[in-house]
Amino acid sequence: MVTESKDDLSLMRVDHVGSLIRPARLVEMFKRHGAGEASENELKQFQDEAIREVIADQEAHNLPVVNDGEFRRVSFQDSFGSSVSGFRAPKNTIQLQQRRALLDAKETPALAGRKPVSERLSLLRNQPLEEYLFARSVAHNPVKVTLLSLDRICQRFDYESSYSVYSGMDEFLADVVALQRRMITELVEAGCRYIQIDAPSYTAYTDPTLLDEMRNRGEDPIANMARSVEAENAVIAGFPKITFGIHVCRGNRPGG
């Protein structure tokens, strides 16, 4: 009989994508917080309770790796947008709903809403690390965290309107790689052994509408994808004892 350590992820065959449906009471608290009707501390208390419950539920189903359901995030993209300066992201549920309504009203594809940066990127906090530390404190099994892919970040970057900050995509991407590696290093030092890269934007390379948008901007989609893959590999290089996964989908806008 061969026995494996609980921390050995090499034989893991059960997993979930990381983003779970929020309890109704937590959704309502996000709305109240976004409207200024609840404090940051009240929101955190609801998040803590919901995360304890969802981790206990995962462990009750004998999942070998668990996570916090991304219950502290307004959007899955917060892992980067809420951690750095200069990269715009909705700050609360109200803003996210308004942005979604605007995009839907214009029938805009999934990768619409490209934004310029307001300043050179710098790390303000490591939100995935904060999420990991709490989840680890209440979990018995190894905890997974999720980070936003380089390709998604690039496809949201309006480089044409950002030349006063960055000379182009390559210079911007170099900063993103450095910041993501710093975030991962801090996670590894804290004991995290499983990191998932959320990369829904790779489906754009099979979508005629989105391919046309890239070409209309004078871009080569194949070159874009190759650049992103190279950057993703640069982010995860040099972490030999860490399990990295990648999640590719077409989104679940109604499910948040």
Image (spheres, rainbow, N blue to C red):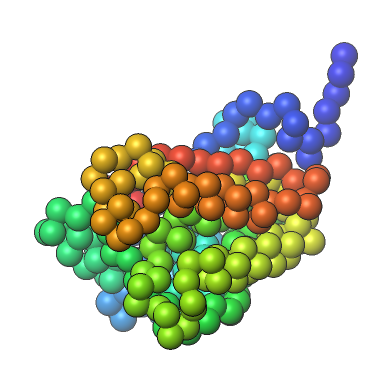
Q: Is residue 4 above or below residue 152?
A: above
Residue at x 49%, y 78% (from the top left corner): 166
Percent x, y for residue 134?
A: 64, 61
Percent x, y for residue 173?
A: 55, 65
In the picture provided, is 213 more to the left or to the right than 184? left
Closer to us: 6 or 218: 218
Closer to us: 125 or 182: 182
Q: Is residue 41 visible?
A: no
Residue at x 66%, y 44% (from the top left corner): 244
Residue at x 40%, y 71% (from the top left corner): 159
Closer to us: 221 or 13: 221
Q: Is residue 234 visible?
A: yes
Q: Residue furthest top?
A: 1
Q: Is residue 114 above or below residue 8?
A: below
Q: Is residue 44 above or below residue 245?
A: below
In the picture provided, is 33 more to the left or to the right than 7? left
